[in-house]
Image: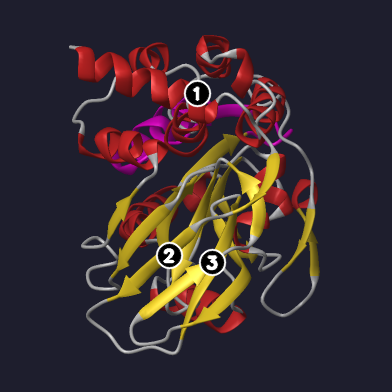
Amino acid sequence: MKKIIVFLALCFSVSAIQGQDSNVQLKGTVTDTIVKYVYLQKFHNKMFTTIDSVKVVDGKFGFKTKVKLPELYGLSVNTANSPLYIFLEKAPITVQLSPVKYYSTSVIEGSVSQDLFNIYQKTENVDISKFITEHPGSLVSAYVLYRNWSYRLTPDQITQNIALLDKSQQNSTYVKELKELVKVLNGLQIGKKAPDFVSKNPEGKDIRFSENLNGYTLVDFWASWCGPCRRENPNIVAAYKEYHDRGFNVFGVSLDKKKENWVKGIQDDNLNWLQVSDLLFWNSEIAKLYGVRAIPSNYLVDSKGVIVAKNLRGEELQATLKTLLNRS
């Protein structure tokens, strides 16, 4: 029991001060591969941007970069792939960095936040409110609420969980973005009008959403790189074939990064409806406009653009369409 109390106290003390720039004390060894450089990356909006790199000498590396601490960063030996997620703090931290199995065999020592994050990841059936209540001053609590729960909870539930966080976390980037998300989601409830937007189709032509509403339209957020999206696409194709002649349409919005991958995904999955994308990945302006934090995600709207349903999957999509179109 004493060890648990000490651990929780450390979590609070380490995370209590937010937003301070300090020189990181980070060193480590690279295992299971031979590389010339290790890259330190900054996390924002589910994406990582390289902010520094160091040479690997005799399998060892070290960073003294001035960064915001405590905060989540990424360590990588190849910036084309997802990095190792690492919570850096104002303390000496050592890493055994291995790219094997998506860095899952890497070992991080010296970061109390990392230790808590590891516990969170290994816990089954997490009760997020309980987790935050037990660790209200930890950056990890704010991060997992933002990253893992923002798309599972209602706006009211997000707000309630934010209130459980300690005062030290209320000005964190994650809480600020969650509060903005709540505002967006409150304007996207069933019965509200879906926001209008303009984006480019694969041929580079501007397409306005509001000019393409006829019957019921599914605004479908997806991407060629998204496995769950690709697995869901056959269900949407089946619904389109079944109900298109009766007034069902789809308006695809892709969060792709590369046009060629986007176009190939459309062709491979037989998505024979309007498609647009700004090719900005998670920085997509349309995704932000619709509060999309995970894909696949969708909104079903009527001919006036009013939202009638959200996040319909598989048989639920067909059942909803059957009810609506039989009624009309």
Which residue is tagged 1?
13
Q: Earlier in the sequence, mark 3 or mark 2?
A: 2
How many marks on residues?
Answer: 3
Q: Are marks 3 and 2 in contact (CB under 8 Å)?
A: yes
Which residue is tagged 3?
63
Residue 256, x across and y down, in percent: 56, 67
- Label 3 and label 1: CA atoms lie apart by 24 Å
Q: Earlier in the sequence, mark 3 or mark 1?
A: 1
Quarter occupied by the C terminus: top right
Q: Give the SS element for disc 2.
A: strand
- Amino acid type at circle 3 is Phe
Which residue is tagged 2?
27
Residue 131, x across and y down, in percent: 35, 19
| Magenta residues, start to end | 302-328
Q: Which residue is drawn at the image coordinates 72% and 23% (left, top)?
A: 183
Q: Nearer the viewer, residue 166 or 318?
A: 166
Label annotation for residue 5: none
Q: Which residue is drawn at the image coordinates 50% and 30% (left, top)?
A: 14
Q: Is residue 306 magenta?
A: yes
Residue 252, x across and y down, in percent: 58, 57
